[in-house]
Amino acid sequence: MTPPATPTQTAQAPALLEGVPGIVADWSSDQRSFKNVPWGKAMMWIFLLSDTFIFSSFLISYMTVRMSTTEPWPNPSEVFALTIFGKHIPLILIAIMTFVLISSSGTMAMAVKFGYEKNRRMTFILLLITAALGATFVGMQAFEWTKLIEDGVRPWGNPMGAAQFGASFFMITGFHGTHVSIGVIFLLIVAAKVIRGDLDNERPGFLTGRKGKYEIVEIMGLYWHFVDLVWVFIFAVFYLW
Amino acid sequence: MAHVEGQQHPIGIYLKIWGLLFVLSAASYMVDYLHIQGYLRWFLIIVFMLLKAGLIVAVFMHMMWERLALMYAILVPTLLLMVLVGIGALEADYTFFTRGVFFVKQLL
């Protein structure tokens, strides 16, 4: 019995075609279609594609209710304004949240890089910074929700204008915030695995029993960057419209 | 290289993209801060949004280094969403119109 082919053995396989012939060859090879990619990573991409459709459904429904309402939509620039040191700054809270999330994406990208270099310590530190920034983001979102609820915003109405504002806001940011919270937990689990040496020692996972590998840091990274990606769209169409 | 599977890229590219994302975010915030309105506002918001999304997917998520088979499998289906945006916009216009008609009748 020969052992089944592992992904690392494809290095010795014949050279892969590039361009459109490459797509045809990959998909018609009667083998896995995604060459040079661990299956966990391909599956994460497919999950993210499905998640894209979920978030798009929310954002498109929001667009539809906002375009069809005859009442004026509350001005996000004013609703999310804060008074800091006696100065009234529009939308500042959301701007800070955006910078926090982008920074966490930057540290995540570097964690993946150090992971593949097998630099255990740097990977661990960067993952922890990413988790801390993510938790900061969720905290600011909790503050934002509290402020809006105190201002009388409810899913069925609000004092500022169109009733659909609350439903759209709580649904979209709530779903995104849930993703960030799950991401923070996911980050802490991966960070613990990294510092414990599970990935260097190929220790079997607690749930799946799969060997620990540094590719899980990249797979985790895909999820985290996606959360940032969704925020880019929410920031543009919900807060800046 | 021991691992063909892993994505190995110099750290500089991540730092540059990070900086670029900061600049683009600041720029889209300035659109609101400077009260730019009308079509220019829409144009700038959409351009900054797509640039940021593109940079995140291409570099941070390593899509530009993946094989076309994966790239097309993930990116092409998202284009279908444009159809959904179109349907949503048409439907919203019609709802807005009928609401207008209904509410005007109530006033008369």
Image (spheres, coloured by chain):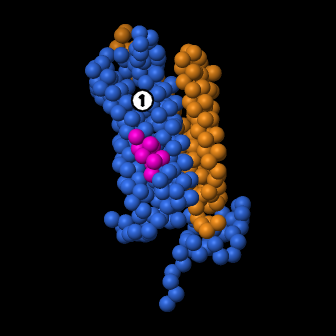
Residue B45, above or below A134:
above
- Residue at 51% in and 37% down: A102
Above or below: residue A27 compared with residue A60: below
Q: Which residue in the protein does label 1 denote?
A: A65
Q: Residues within 10 Å of mark 1 (few under 14, many from 20)?
A: many
- In this view, the residue farthest toward the bottom is A1
Q: Which chain is orange?
A: B
Q: Which is more toward the observer, B94 or A21?
A: A21
Residue visible at 38% across and 55% down in the picture = A192
Q: Quadrant of residue B3?
A: bottom right
Q: Write the start and end of the magenta stretch as one range.
A: A124-132
In the rendered view, does B66 fall on the left or right side of A95?
Answer: right
Name the residue furthest front: A121
On screen, A184 above or below A9?
Answer: above
Give whichever of B90, A227 is nearer the camera.
A227
Q: Is residue A142 magenta?
A: no
Q: Is residue A129 magenta?
A: yes
Residue at 57% of width from left, 21% of height from top? B30
Q: Colour of chain A?
A: blue
In this orientation, does residue A222 appear?
no
Residue depicted at 46% across the width and 15% down the height: A89
Spot occupied by residue A103 in the image (x, y as percentages of width and height): 51, 37
Q: Secondary structure at mark 1?
A: helix
Subunit of label 1: A
Residue B63: horizontal and vertical position, in percent? 60, 52
| Position in image of residue A84 (x %, y %) | 41, 15
